[in-house]
Image (tube, rainbow, N blue to C red):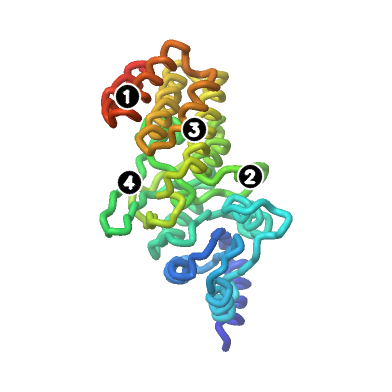
Amino acid sequence: MPLNLYFRGFNCYAFILNCSLVSIIIPTYNRAHLIGETLDSVLAQTYQHWECIVVDDGSTDNTSELLKDYCAKDARFQYHQRPFDRPKGGNSCRNYGFELSKGDLIQWFDSDDLMYPKLLDLKLDKFNADSKIDFIVCGFKLVFANRDFVTYLAAEVPNYLFGYIDDKLRLNGQNILWKKDKIMTLKWDEGLHKYQDLDFIFKVLRDNILNGFSIPDVLVDIRVNGDSISSNQSSFYNKDRLVVRKRMYNYAVEHYSSEKVLRLYHLYLFEIRNLISTKNFSICFTELISSKLIPFKVKITILQYLFIYILFKKGLFSLTQYLIKVST
């Protein structure tokens, strides 16, 4: 029996058994050299009732040929082009993939990352054991091009957004499995190209009405390649970081305690420091001049440190210490 017919039959059998369909949504752009490993890690899942929707952002390499092969071998794979009337970018692809999805559960993923074989199985076990769970977080490994890595386990916390804000938990698109009906009204911001994960997660969790669960184990490898958005420090992407931090701060002022507002102000000021350390001076100057969050005296002091750093390449540590001081 051809594989595609086999899996169609399997999906029908799973439906009868009331197994939840997982929709794995992957945006991609010129990742033909990497996405095959990602799709192989999807195929290796011990939980078999999934659909994998790959949305291409206009690749110019041989991505389409590669994906056609995967779709021919396994009908659970789908390959779509981003509609021409949608803005270019990964978030447009994510939103379009979500519109096409038929699953009860949503797993966002990136086209250069890897799932461990038990990723879906372990999370489905928890969903099936407790119907009150709305999303499940797992640990992940951040893997760099030189093969160095950093491991982040998933802690159990009473409030997942505050756990992230307080640096007790790392959240991203790849390490969370969502119940679809809990995120139906939300979209990824198609104007963002960096920190889009945090922006989306913040919108979902900011009201603290969803119940999360943590599986501490590492079940995902997030690969930081030289051409990835995660490793890009251009002005374009750093501007997005400021946008997201300000959104979080402004929401916190109206809804959270002064302690959390102060913490988010600190994270916003850290992005100012990041702009300086990555030599994005024009955005830094623009932000300092236009920002309504930073008091005038603080702006002047930061500008002084900034000029010293530009002229003499010194003072970054002192600036960092000052930013910590004024945000606590």
Which amino acid does the dot numbered 2 rest on? Lys
The residue lying toward the viewer, choosing from 35 and 155, is 35
Q: Nearer the viewer, mark 1 or mark 2?
A: 1
Q: Which mark identifies residue 308?
A: 1
Q: Earlier in the sequence, mark 4 or mark 2?
A: 4
- Amino acid type, label 3: Ile
Q: Where is residue 139 drawn, in percent x and y?
A: 36, 49
Is residue 99 positioned above or below 272 on the image? below
Q: Earlier in the sequence, mark 3 or mark 1?
A: 3
* Position of residue 52 measured from the top left corner of the image (x, y, whole percent): 56, 65
Residue at which label 2 appears? 187
Q: Residue at x 39, y 65 (%)?
A: 117
Which of the numbered marks, if any, corresponds to residue 283? Answer: 3
N-terminal of the two: label 3 or label 2?
Answer: 2
**In this view, the mark in front (3 or 2):** 3
Quarter occupied by residue 44: bottom left
Q: Position of residue 263 (x, y in %)?
A: 41, 23
Which quarter of the picture shows residue 275?
A: top left
Do the numbered discs 1 and 2 sit on residues whose CB atoms are within 8 Å?
A: no
